[in-house]
Image (tube, rainbow, N blue to C red):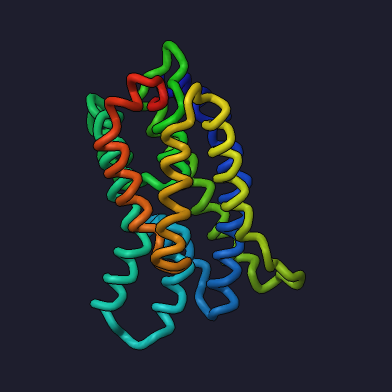
């Protein structure tokens, strides 16, 4: 059962592998050139497992001790996971103790796969989601650790590797767009992001966008479901 779930989950994580290894490696190199041992990206990737926050954490480690400011910054960067968690309440039912790791290891990419992908017939849903989450975290941890180990040997310019993450989300969005008969949810997401970007600016629009999307989907769920536009 577990092996079958692993084999079913692996193909869905291949695009994540490509992006996570590039970004994780970049993060490991960044930690290395900032004067940190490979142990730091290794442990931070396991404990934090939040790409954006881990990059910001480098400057936090080098700044004066400020626990309150650090907590607020970390909360704001990762606050979108609150909305991911709400969306996954039904998905995580009846999966046993695996639910604990699924909650702990949930990231943007694992959420995108576990929320949107229809689990193949004959495959246990809980183990499928578990292996999606585990594989994605393994890609990130191994990539960042390798970057931390080999960072001092890198001599070429790695500027722009961070765009891999953006490209990956565009592909996931387009795939979901093609699967939907109606595009109400996608248009709600696009519209909310554009409006909040204009109102709150580039550095502060993410959390308001997630709030808007959640409220709109909550209040208009039934009409959208009747129209066949919510999966």
Where does residue 126 sit, x and y in percent of width and height? 34, 26
Q: Residue at x 56, y 65 (%)?
A: 28
Q: Residue at x 39, y 32 (%)?
A: 115
- Is 160 or 60 nearer to us in this picture? 160
Residue 55 visible to an observer of this rendering: yes
19 left or right, relative to 209: right
Q: Residue furthest bottom?
A: 64
Q: Residue at x 44, y 68 (%)?
A: 201
Where does residue 46 sit, x and y in percent of width and height? 40, 55
30 up-or-down from 80: above or below: below
Where does residue 155 sit, x and y in percent of width and height? 75, 72
- Is 226 or 67 nearer to us in this picture? 226
188 left or right, relative to 72: right
57 left or right, relative to 222: right
Residue 40 visible to an observer of this rendering: no
- Is 56 or 156 nearer to us in this picture? 56
């Amino acid at each position: 059962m577990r092996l079958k779930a692993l084999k079913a989950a692996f193909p869905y994580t291949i695009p994540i592998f490509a992006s996570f290894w590039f970004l994780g490696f970049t993060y490991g190199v960044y930690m290395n050139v900032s004067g940190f041992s490979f142990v730091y990206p290794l442990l931070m990737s396991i404990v934090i497992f939040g790409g954006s926050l881990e990059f910001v954490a480098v400057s936090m480690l080098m700044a004066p001790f400020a626990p309150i400011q650090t907590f607020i910054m970390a909360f704001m960067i990762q606050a979108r996971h609150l909305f991911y968690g709400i969306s996954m309440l039904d998905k995580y039912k009846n999966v046993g103790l695996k639910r604990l790791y699924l909650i702990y290891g949930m990231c943007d990419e694992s959420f995108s796969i576990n929320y949107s992908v229809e689990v193949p017939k004959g495959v246990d849903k809980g183990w499928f989601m578990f292996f999606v989450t585990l594989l994605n975290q393994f890609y990130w941890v191994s990539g960042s650790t390798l970057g931390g180990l080999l960072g001092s040997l890198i001599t070429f310019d790695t500027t722009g590797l961070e765009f891999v993450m953006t490209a990956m989300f565009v592909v996931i969005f387009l795939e979901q767009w093609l699967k939907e008969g109606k595009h109400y949810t996608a248009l709600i997401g696009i519209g909310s992001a554009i409006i909040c970007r204009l109102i709150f600016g580039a550095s502060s629009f993410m959390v308001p966008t997630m709030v808007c999307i959640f409220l709109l989907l909550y209040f208009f769920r039934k009409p959208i479901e009747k129209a066949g536009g919510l999966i």
